[in-house]
C-alpha cells in the first residue's frame, strides 16, 4: 500500500491505492458521535479513534470488505457488507468478507454485544459505500470526458448511457484511488434499495456445511499442548491440597500445574488430559458463603420484606394511591440461574514467548481480553496479538475473558503453546450465569378499573440493577415506585442474551395481564389505554416511543386475529428493548386437558430490516430461545455446586418442542435498531398469558415445566 | 499404545492412540478432521455425529477400539464438493446461525434420509431430536431436511 493520498475533514474516511492497482477505502464502522448501548459502555476496551474497517476494490473487480467484529451467529459478516454494497451499487457475487484480527491501532471497537452493531454503524457503512461509488463514477467521467451527472453506477459497473460506455469497478479502481474523497455524498432513497431489505444467505454457509475449521476449538498448531483445568466445583471454596501423582503417571501427560484456584492438566492430546484429570485428588476448603437454592429462596423472601432498597424511579404518591385504591393486585415472579451453554465450549489458544504473546480463539471482546492479558503478564499490549475465530455461540458468555486469561497464564507458566479446553461440565459448573431474580409487583386500581398505582421491587443475586425502571408502564401510571435489592454471592453472574429483560419482560407482561384481568379489561386494549394515557398525560420521563409500541400491538392483533379464534387460547405480550419493539401473541390449545403451545405470532419494529433472512432467523431463534428457557431450563445449587452437570440434566429445547412461529416486520423506514436480543424478552409473557387463558392457572415461576399443570395425571 | 487401522472417508488411516480414545478426538487431534464438533462428550447434543457403516453415531462416545473394520464417514467426506442434497438444502434454506452444530445436524439427517427418503414432519422431528441447536435454528433445520428429501 502507498501512503494515503487524501483524507477528508470527516476523519473516518481515508483512501489509498492498493499495491496491485486498485482502491482501498478505510473507514470507521462506529460513529464516534452516536450513543452506544449500555452494555457496550460498561465494557472497557482498548484503542482509540481510528479506522475499524475497509473496503477494497481490486483490479479484477473483486471487492473485499473487512468485518472487524466477532461473528457468533448474529450474521454480522453478511449484513454489514450488504449495507456497503447497497450504496456502492456493487455486484453482490463479487464481494468477499474477511474477519479482521484484533488491531486496536487501526480499528476501533471490535466487540459484539448489546444488539448494537448495525444501529451504530448504519450511516457510516452507507457513507463509505456511497463515497467509493462517487469516486468510481468520477474516475469514469474524467476518463470519458463527460459530465459526472451523466454517469451512473449499477451492479458493479459505471455507465454513461448517452454514449453507451461502460466500465467495471475493477477497471476504474486505481484511477479512483487517486482522486480526493468527496466532502459530501448523497445516500440512496430507500425506495431504490436493491440489496438492503432482501434475503441474502449467510456468507459462511458453504464453509459451515462442509466442516471447515472456523471455530476456536478447530485451531491446531504443530507442537501445541492441550490442557483441561479442574476449577473448584463449589462457589465459595478454594484449593487446600493437590495430589497429582496418579494423573502425572498417565501416558501423554506433560505436567500438572496449580495456579490460583486451578489445577491444569497439560498433555499431548485432549483425551489424555481428560483421562488424567479424573485421577487428580484435590481437597478444597471454604473461603466464602456456601449457598444452596433453598438459601436463595429464603434470601428472596427476606429481602423483599426487609431489604434496604435502592430506589430506581418514583412518581407521585404511591402510599396514598394504594391506601385509597378500589382494588389491589399483588404477585411475585421468580426465575432460576441459567447457563449460557453456547454449543462450542470455552477454549483458547495461548503462546507466551519471550518476545510476545499470541492468542487465538472465540471471544466477544478481544480488546478487553488483550488488555487484561497484558496486565496479568506484565507484557505491553503491542506485544500481544489476538486472532478472532468464529464463535460457536456466545449469548453473553464470551463477553467475559476469564478463559483467555487462564490460557495465557498457563502458557506463561509452562512456557509452551497450549490450547485450554473446557468440557461441558466445566461450562455448566463454571459460573457467569444469568442471575436468579425474584420480583414483587403491586398494582392499585380505581373504581373504573384504571391503573393508578404501580410498585415493583426486584431482588437479585449478583444481578446489578434487575429493573428497567423507565420501561413501560412507567410514564403511564400516576403513582409509581420501582426499587431493588441485590444480594452478593460467590456465585458468578454475567450478561445473558437480553440481560435482565430476558426474565423481567416475562414477569412484567404476565403481571400486567393479571392487572387487566382484575380490571375486567381485554389485556391488549388495556396496554393501548395505558399508552394513550402516557401520550396525553405523561408521568415523568418517557424513554420509549409510544407510537412504535402502539403500532406493533395493533399489528399483532390484526395478524393473530386477536380474540377471534374459537378453540384457541391467546396470550399477548409486548416489550421494548435494545431500541426495538416486539409484540407477540401465543396460541395454546388443550390436548387431553394439558396446555400445548402451538404457535407464536410476532411483530417486530427494528426499523429498517437489513437482511430479511438473517432478521427472520434472529426473531425465530430469539423466540424459540426465550420459549425454551422459560419452559425447560434451570440451574440449581446444593452447597455451592450446580446440581446440573451436562445436557443430560441441564435441559435445552429440542426440535419436537418448538412451536410454529410467524414473523412480521414493521416497514417504517426508521434507521435500524437492535435485533439480536429484542425478540426474546416478550415470549415468556405471551406464553404464560395464553396458558392462563387455557387453564386458569397463572405461571409465575420459571421453568414452567415444573408446574403441576404439565405433570402427568 | 496400540495402532488402529481405520477407514475414514474412503481412505485407510492409522491412529496410534489409547484404546479408549473416542473417535471424535482421533479425528480432531490426530487426523486434522475437525468437522465433527465437541459439544457435551456424553452423546447428548449430536454435534459430533459421524457415520459408521452408514449409521449415525456419536463419535464423542465411541471408543476407537470398537470401530474395527467399519467404514467411517465424516462431514468432510459426505460429498465431494459439498454438494450433498442436504448441504445444498442447508445453503438454500439459509440454516446456519453460529454454525457450530450444523455438521452434526447434517450427518444425522443424512443417515436418516438414507433409511427414510420420504419422511413425514413427525419422523423428521423424531430423527433430529438428539441434536441440539443452541441458536434455535430448528425451524429451518426441519425445513431443509424436508427440502432435501424431495431431491434425494
Image (spheres, coloured by chain):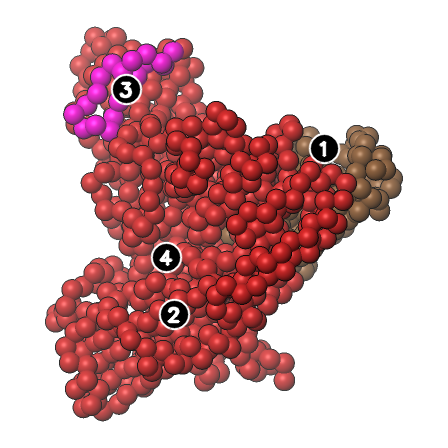
Q: Can residue B92 be seen here?
A: no
Left or right of A508: which side holds A222? right
**Residues at marks 3 and 1, common chain?**
no
Residue A695 x/y as whole percent: 48, 83
In depth, the one of A188 and B31 nearer the eye is B31
Chain A shade = red
Q: Chain of mark 4?
A: A
State the quadrant of the N terminus of chain A: top left
Q: Earlier in the sequence, mark 2 or mark 4?
A: 2
Label 1: which secondary element? helix
The nearer-to-camera label among 3 and 2 is: 2
**Mark 4 neighbour class, 10 Å CA radius: few under 14, some 14 to 19, many 20 or more:** many
Residue identified by numbered label 4: A678
Residue identified by numbered label 2: A487
Residue A563 x/y as whole percent: 38, 75
Label 4: which secondary element? loop
Give the alpha-carbon distance from disc 1 to disc 4, as whole Å. 42 Å
Q: Chain of mark 3?
A: A
Answer above or below: position of A497 versus A45.
below
Residue identified by numbered label 1: B31
Label 3: which secondary element? strand
Residue identified by numbered label 3: A15
Chain B shade = brown
Going 33% across and 17% down the picture, which residue do you hit?
A23
Circle 2/circle 4 CB separation < 8 Å: no
Q: Chain of mark 2?
A: A
Give the alpha-carbon distance from disc 4 to disc 3, as whole Å. 37 Å
Magenta stretch: give its range: A1-19
The nearer-to-camera label among 2 and 4 is: 2
**Residues at marks 3 and 2, common chain?**
yes
Q: Earlier in the sequence, mark 4 or mark 3?
A: 3
The nearer-to-camera label among 3 and 1 is: 1
Amino acid at each position: 500500500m502507498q501512503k494515503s493520498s487524501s483524507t477528508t475533514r470527516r476523519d473516518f474516511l481515508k483512501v489509498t491505492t492498493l499495491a496491485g492497482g486498485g482502491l482501498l477505502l478505510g473507514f470507521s464502522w462506529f460513529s464516534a458521535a452516536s450513543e452506544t448501548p449500555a452494555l457496550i459502555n460498561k465494557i472497557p476496551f482498548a484503542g482509540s479513534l481510528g479506522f475499524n474497517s475497509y473496503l477494497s476494490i481490486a483490479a479484477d473487480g473483486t471487492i473485499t470488505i473487512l468485518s472487524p467484529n466477532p461473528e457468533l451467529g448474529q450474521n454480522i459478516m453478511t449484513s454489514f457488507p450488504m449495507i456497503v454494497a447497497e450504496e456502492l451499487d456493487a455486484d453482490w457475487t463479487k464481494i468477499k468478507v474477511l474477519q479482521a484480527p484484533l488491531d486496536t491501532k487501526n480499528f476501533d471497537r471490535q466487540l459484539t454485544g448489546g444488539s448494537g452493531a448495525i444501529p451504530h454503524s448504519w450511516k457510516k457503512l452507507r457513507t463509505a459505500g456511497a463515497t467509493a461509488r462517487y469516486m468510481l463514477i468520477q474516475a469514469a467521467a474524467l476518463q470519458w470526458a463527460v459530465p459526472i451527472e451523466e454517469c451512473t453506477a449499477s451492479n458493479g459497473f459505471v455507465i454513461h448511457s448517452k454514449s453507451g460506455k461502460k466500465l467495471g469497478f475493477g477497471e476504474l479502481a486505481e484511477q479512483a484511488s487517486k482522486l480526493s474523497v468527496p466532502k459530501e455524498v448523497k445516500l440512496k432513497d430507500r425506495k431504490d434499495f436493491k440489496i438492503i431489505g432482501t434475503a441474502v444467505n449467510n456468507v459462511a454457509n458453504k464453509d459451515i456445511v462442509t466442516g471447515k475449521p472456523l471455530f476456536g476449538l478447530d485451531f491446531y498448531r504443530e507442537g501445541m499442548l492441550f490442557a483441561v483445568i479442574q476449577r473448584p466445583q463449589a462457589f465459595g471454596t478454594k484449593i487446600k491440597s493437590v495430589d497429582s501423582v496418579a494423573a502425572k503417571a498417565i501416558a501423554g501427560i506433560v505436567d500438572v500445574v496449580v495456579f490460583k484456584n486451578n489445577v491444569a492438566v497439560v498433555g499431548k492430546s485432549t483425551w489424555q488430559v481428560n483421562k488424567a484429570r479424573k485421577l487428580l485428588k484435590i481437597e478444597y476448603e471454604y473461603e466464602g458463603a456456601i449457598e444452596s437454592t433453598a438459601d436463595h429462596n429464603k434470601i428472596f423472601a427476606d429481602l423483599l420484606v426487609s431489604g434496604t432498597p435502592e430506589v430506581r424511579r418514583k412518581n407521585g404518591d404511591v402510599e396514598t394511591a394504594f391506601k385509597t385504591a378500589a382494588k389491589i393486585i399483588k404477585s411475585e415472579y421468580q426465575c432460576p440461574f441459567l447457563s449460557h451453554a453456547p454449543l462450542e465450549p470455552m477454549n483458547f489458544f495461548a503462546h507466551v514467548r519471550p518476545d510476545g504473546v499470541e492468542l487465538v480463539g472465540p471471544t466477544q471482546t478481544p480488546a478487553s481480553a488483550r488488555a487484561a492479558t497484558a496486565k496479568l503478564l506484565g507484557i505491553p499490549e503491542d506485544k500481544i496479538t489476538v486472532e478472532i475465530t468464529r464463535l460457536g455461540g456466545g449469548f453473553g458468555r464470551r463477553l467475559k475473558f476469564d478463559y483467555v486469561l487462564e490460557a495465557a497464564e498457563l502458557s506463561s507458566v509452562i512456557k509452551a503453546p497450549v490450547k485450554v479446553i473446557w468440557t461441558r461440565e466445566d461450562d455448566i459448573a463454571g459460573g457467569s450465569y444469568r442471575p436468579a431474580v425474584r420480583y414483587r409487583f403491586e398494582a392499585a386500581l380505581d373504581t373504573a378499573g384504571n391503573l393508578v398505582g404501580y410498585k415493583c421491587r426486584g431482588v437479585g443475586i449478583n444481578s446489578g440493577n434487575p429493573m428497567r425502571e423507565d420501561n413501560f408502564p412507567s410514564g403511564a401510571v400516576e403513582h409509581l415506585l420501582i426499587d431493588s435489592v441485590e444480594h452478593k454471592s460467590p456465585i458468578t453472574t454475567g450478561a445473558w442474551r437480553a440481560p435482565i429483560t430476558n426474565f423481567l419482560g416475562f414477569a412484567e407482561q404476565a403481571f400486567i395481564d393479571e392487572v387487566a384481568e382484575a380490571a375486567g379489561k381485554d389485556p391488549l386494549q388495556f396496554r393501548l389505554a395505558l399508552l394513550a394515557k402516557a401520550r396525553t398525560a405523561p408521568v415523568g420521563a418517557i424513554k420509549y416511543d409510544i407510537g412504535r409500541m402502539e403500532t406493533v400491538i395493533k399489528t399483532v392483533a390484526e395478524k393473530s386475529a386477536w380474540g377471534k379464534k374459537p378453540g384457541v387460547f391467546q396470550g399477548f405480550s409486548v416489550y421494548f428493548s435494545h431500541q426495538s419493539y416486539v409484540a407477540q401473541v401465543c396460541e395454546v390449545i388443550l390436548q387431553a386437558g394439558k396446555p400445548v403451545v402451538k404457535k407464536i405470532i410476532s411483530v417486530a419494529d427494528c426499523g429498517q430490516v437489513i437482511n430479511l433472512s438473517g432478521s427472520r432467523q434472529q426473531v425465530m431463534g430469539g423466540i424459540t430461545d426465550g420459549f425454551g428457557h422459560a419452559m425447560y431450563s434451570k440451574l440449581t445449587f446444593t452447597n455451592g455446586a450446580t446440581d446440573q452437570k451436562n445436557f443430560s440434566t441441564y435441559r435445552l429445547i429440542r426440535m419436537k418442542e418448538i412451536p410454529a412461529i410467524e414473523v412480521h416486520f414493521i416497514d417504517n423506514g426508521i434507521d435500524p435498531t437492535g435485533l439480536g436480543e429484542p425478540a426474546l424478552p416478550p415470549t415468556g409473557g405471551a406464553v404464560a398469558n395464553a396458558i392462563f387463558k387455557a387453564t386458569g392457572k397463572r405461571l409465575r415461576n420459571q421453568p414452567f415445566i415444573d408446574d403441576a399443570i404439565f405433570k402427568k395425571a | 499404545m496400540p495402532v488402529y487401522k481405520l477407514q475414514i472417508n474412503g481412505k485407510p488411516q492409522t491412529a496410534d492412540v489409547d484404546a479408549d480414545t473416542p473417535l471424535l478426538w482421533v479425528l480432531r487431534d490426530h487426523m486434522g478432521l475437525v468437522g465433527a464438533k465437541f459439544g457435551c462428550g456424553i452423546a447428548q447434543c449430536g454435534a459430533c455425529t459421524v457415520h459408521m457403516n452408514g449409521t449415525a453415531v456419536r463419535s464423542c462416545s465411541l471408543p476407537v477400539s470398537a470401530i474395527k473394520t467399519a467404514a467411517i464417514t465424516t462431514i468432510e467426506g459426505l460429498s465431494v464438493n459439498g454438494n450433498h442434497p442436504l448441504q445444498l438444502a442447508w445453503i438454500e434454506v439459509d440454516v446456519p446461525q453460529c454454525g457450530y452444530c450444523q455438521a452434526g445436524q447434517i450427518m444425522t439427517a443424512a443417515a436418516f434420509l438414507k433409511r427414510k427418503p420420504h419422511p413425514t414432519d413427525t419422523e423428521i422431528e423424531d430423527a433430529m431430536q438428539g441434536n441440539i441447536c443452541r441458536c434455535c435454528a430448528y425451524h429451518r433445520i426441519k425445513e431443509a431436511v424436508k427440502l432435501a428429501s424431495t431431491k434425494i
